[in-house]
Image: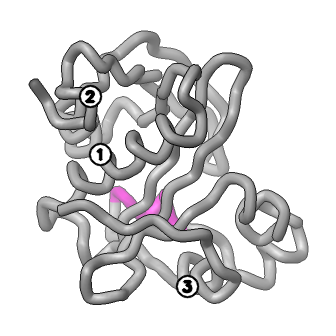
Amino acid sequence: MNFQLRPMTEEDARQLCEWRYPAPYDRYGWPSWEQMVRDGREFADPEIRASQYVSAIRESGEMAAYVQFFPLDRAVRIGLGLRPDLCGAGLGLGLVRSAVQEAKRRYPDHEIDLEVETWNRRAIKTYERAGFAVEDEYDRPSPNGIVRVLCMVWLPARTDGNGAQA
């Protein structure tokens, strides 16, 4: 399944702050909307929301996920979040493929990468199926303390060019 990506609205952003994941994925939840606004954090900042975030919409018209496109020097780092009740339902690969397509459109000359915590085998497997490969492993600070992450890079040679594994 592919998703329609559209600019994230403030209402979409508010909804994200209400998503609650079961353990151990609960670390991926966002603070309350009020706290996000107070801190000027991520998608609560209208400029960051407009330049980096999109909502992923299902055929039914409901928001199912979000994608962030964070520009780096020669790469664009994608971040993804699937609505908690849709996790484990086989939608991740379609979301990642949609994100890769949009990243290629926005940043055609940039490498596409992402970070994923090393314990999240479910996400790592999905990213590998979408054509990503581990490039590096390191520790980085997060709201949950220091976490061990993999940096995975999208390799077009491992896919059909559309994000589908060749």
Q: Residue at x 82, y 70 (%)?
A: 46
Q: Main secondary structure of the magenta part?
A: helix
Q: Amino acid at mark 2?
A: Gly
Mark nearer the viewer, 1 or 2: 2
Q: Spatial distance from mark 1 to mark 2, Cα to Cα?
A: 10 Å
Q: CA distance from mark 2 to mark 3?
A: 33 Å
Q: Quadrant of the C terminus?
A: top left
Q: Where does the N terminus fall, quadrant-wise?
A: bottom left
Q: Is residue 144 above or below residue 104?
A: below
Q: Which residue is mark 2?
A: 161
Residue type of the residue flagged with mark 3: Gln
Q: Amino acid at mark 1?
A: Arg
Q: CA distance from mark 3 to mark 1?
A: 23 Å
**Label 3 neighbour load within 10 Å: few <14, some 14-19, many 20+:** some
Residues drawn in magenta: 24-29
Of the numbered discs in the image, which one, if any, rests on residue 97?
1
What residue would you read off at disc 3?
15
Q: Secondary structure at mark 1?
A: helix
- Residue drawn at x 48%, y 27% is 113
Choose mark 3 or mark 1, whichever is in front. 1
The correct choice, above or below, for 38 with respect to 104 in the image is below
**Could you tell me residue 25's position as x and y percent?**
37, 59
Q: Is residue 25 magenta?
A: yes
Q: Position of residue 117 (x, y in %)?
A: 42, 35
- Answer with left or right where residue 137 lies relative to residue 46: left
Residue nearer the viewer, 116 or 91? 91
The answer to which quarter of the image holds residue 36 is bottom right
Q: Which image quadrant for residue 48?
A: bottom right
What is the secondary structure assignment of the residue under circle 2?
A: loop
